[in-house]
Structure formats: structure tokens, C-alpha cells
Image (tube, coloured by chain):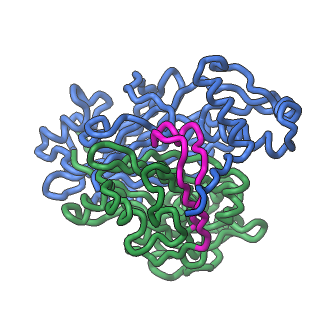
Chain colours: A green, B blue
Amino acid sequence: MSESPVPHEPPIYRRIADGLRARIHAGELRDGDRLPGENALMAEYAIARATARQALAVLINEGLAVPKRGSGVYVRQFKPIRRHGARRLSREQWGQGRAIWDADARGRPFTVDRVEVALERAAEDVARVLDSDQVWVRRRRYLVDARPVQLATSYFPAHLVEGSAITLTDTGPGGVYARLAELGVPPAHFTEEVRARMPNPRESNLLDLPGGTPVIVIARTAYASDGRPVELNEMILDSAAYVLQYDFDA
Amino acid sequence: MSESPVPHEPPIYRRIADGLRARIHAGELRDGDRLPGENALMAEYAIARATARQALAVLINEGLAVPKRGSGVYVRQFKPIRRHGARRLSREQWGQGRAIWDADARGRPFTVDRVEVALERAAEDVARVLDSDQVWVRRRRYLVDARPVQLATSYFPAHLVEGSAITLTDTGPGGVYARLAELGVPPAHFTEEVRARMPNPRESNLLDLPGGTPVIVIARTAYASDGRPVELNEMILDSAAYVLQYDFDA
């Protein structure tokens, strides 16, 4: 080659976002601090409003900042939770532990503030997956740092769990998976199906979501070693509160 | 127990949605057909408008229907793509192949209509993951059935891939992974980090997203067997077009 290619600069809004991110990571801008506003960025960098907005949008999209209506953009007070599928294969075993998104990998303590347990007729899709028209349903809401982050609804084939503590509010030590093991069907395989969509009003209300925040929906099916489905857990996650991580070999 | 618990009926909006879904699956309502409107459902079931709206929202949320502004809700014309992480562990090996969401599991043919290749200075987060300040960047847009469904941007450490076909528009047979193998660093492990958020204007435009459609963002890092990161691929997915599936053992 006659000459090396010249690297492109990242676009200006990216560089502004990089600078603000660095100040957040350095602790110079802290939880709850107001970020420079659009007008301040426009003046400082001689850029258009749309560009300033784009720079702030990068940080909002990364979950590092939250807009408050009519008041500006603030460093956000909640570090997303890193949720691992397939813990066995966690990257720490072989990788160098670098992640693209900043998130809290240690399990933060969560609380459950609502538990409803009921025997129900299964909706068509649930009946198909679990091969059962009657299901025991466990509905919970999970909070981290007093903030609701997840709604979880677990369905169990009624004939399988009838009479076990899975049908009680308190499932006892080890929870539902310990009870499934006692019933001779410990979960051996999991499938997680993941989608994203806007919340419905009930979800928006229960998760206390600000406008414009989508939810991640995970339908996790647990199978016994013989392939029999033993639980379907539908989880609705505040998308701003979570990073999902899956690790696997090529 | 003195008597068996009585199963609850699912709420009325669920039952209406189940009925409409059954008619879609039976082929009675087809792609592009208009679903009964709110007024029709209110009259037929003697329910409030909010309940009718909830019933339709179930199908919209499942990706089975799309609202068109001022015109009603239509059976959607695009079946979501089922994208598998960890193919090796695919559920077909042990499960019974039932999935909660209807999606096309066979690989539908996709096309790539834009490829941009450039040497760039890495943004701070990319530099950190790849341990390289200079990166070769490959930007593509993927279409399925002529509909844009994914934007993908792959980053490679410049010192690693310089001079290889990874820096060319046409990477040759087997694509970038075959070229990485020739360079002695075939991908051995993958980490996928998954988030969801609203699209920025550029993404919205390139993916031709209707309002209120979030994107799923997957940051996929490929590692060589010695743990060295060799590629970071940031994928922006139309959330209405995809179901992600991950399978793993307990």
C-alpha cells in the first residue's frame, strides 16, 4: 500500500458523550448531578442543538443518565443489574472480564414485596408450552434498592405440583427448584426466549416506569432431564435496570 | 384438603386475546386483515374501551398485530425471526421444541444492502473491550423479506486484522470468522450483552421503525481461545422482528 489509511474521528456527539462518560466514571460527576444542558453544550462546542441532544441521548441510552421533564439530564442513581444466563459458563472462567456496559455484576440484594399464588386455567400459549390446561401460578414483584425492577409470573403444571409447597406463598428452603427436585423433576435444561416491547399500563404502573422506557420480556422454560417442561417463568424487566449476559462457546 | 381450589378464569381481555390469536393461528384471520376494532369488541363482549384496548394490546405486544394510526389494528405481515445464541445447545437436542412465541426458526434468507468499512479511532468503551485504540469497523444493514431488521457494527483491533480481507468490503468465503481463523485467532468463546431501549433518530430511520418500537441492542464479544478479544459486534435489532433464544443446562 502506498500509504496507511487515515483513521476517522468518531463524530462530535460521540466525543462529547465519551468526555461526559469519563467524568462520570472518574467520579467527577456523581449520582444525581445535573449534566451540562443542551444550551451549555451548544456554547462550549459550537454545535447545533440536535448534536447536543444526540450526545446526551448516548448517555441516556447507556443508562448512565436520566432525563427529568423540563429540568435537564441527570446522572442516574441506579446502576443496572447484570443478569447472567448460563452461570456455569461465566466469562470469568476464560475471558478478561471486560464488558461493554457498566453494570453491577455482584448480586445486589433484592426483595419481593408481592406474592400471589393461584390455581388457574392456562392461557392458550402457556398450556401449549407446559402441556397442561390447569396451572399453579406464582406472581411476584422484585425490588432492588427499593426500586421495582422485575415482575415474574411462574406457571407450573397443576398435576405435577399439586399438594407441594409450590402451591403455598412460602415455598420453603431452596424455593421452587428445591421442591421440583423433591418431586423428582429438578430442572436440567433452560430455554430463555427474549423480546422487547413497550409496557402495558399495568406493567408501567407496577414497575413505576418513566415514559419511553421499554420492557424486556424473558420467557424462561425449565425442563427436567427427560425433556418434560416443569416451569414457565415469564419475567417483565425494566429495560433501564438490566443488562442480560449470555456466555457460550463457539 | 376439604375441597379442591377452584381455578380462576383468566381476565376477560386475556380470553378475548386468546380467541383472536386462535383465529389468526387457524388462518381465519390472515396477514393484513383488520382485527375487530375497540367499538366492535365493546359491543360484542359488553366491556369498557380500556378492556378492548388491553385485549388488542396483548396481540400487538406479541407481535401478532400492528396498529396503524387512525385506521385500526391489523394482523401483522412479518413473522419474527428466531435468533439462536449457542446453537450447539439447541433445545431440539433434548426438549420438545415448544416455544412460547411464534417465530420463524428456520433461517430465512437475509440480504445486506449497505457495507461500510473504515479504520477509526475507537470510542472509549470499544477501546476498553478490545484493548485497542485503533479499530477496523464494518457497518452493515441486514434485510429480511426486503424489510430492514438489523444494523450491525463490528469492530476489530487494527493491529490484529491489518492487511487481511477483514479490511475489505468483500471479506471472501466464510467471512470474517474464516479470516480470523487464518490469522490464528478463531473465535472460541462469545459473550452477548443484551439491552433494550428506544431507538435514536438514525436507527429509527435506517430500520424504518414505526413510533413506539424499541430496539434490542446486543453487544457480542468474540474471544480467541487464549481469552484475547478479537471482535466486538454491536447489533441493533428491530424488537418487533426478533425473538432471541438462549439454551443452557442447569
The picture places residue A48, in percent across and down from the top left corner, at 67, 55
In the image, taking residue A242 as reference, residue A117 lies left or right, namely right
Q: Residue at x 53, y 34 (%)?
A: B241
Asked if residue A116 is among those painted magenta in the image, a careful observer would answer: yes
Could you tell me residue B214's position as x and y percent? 59, 46
**Vertical arrangement, residue B46 with respect to residue A92, above or below:** above
Q: Nearer the viewer, residue B31 or B167?
A: B31
- Residue at 57%, 37% in the rendered image: A124
**Residue A96 locus on image (x, y percent):** 24, 65
Query: Along the line of sight, which residue is nearer the eye, B106 or A49?
Result: B106
Q: Does B187 lie within the magenta span?
A: no
Number of marks in picture: 0
Q: Is residue B187 left or right of residue B220?
A: left
Question: Which residue is more in the foreground, B145 or A227?
Answer: A227
Q: Is residue A119 visible?
A: yes
Front residue (pair B27, B153): B27
At 51% from the left and 82% from the top, the residue drawn is A28
- Picture quadrant of residue B31: top right
Q: The magenta stretch spans which residues? A: A113-141
Q: Is residue B30 shown above or below A89? A: above
**Residue closest to the far front:** B2
Q: Is residue B124 left or right of residue B248?
A: right
When asked about the image quadrant of residue B121, the answer is bottom left
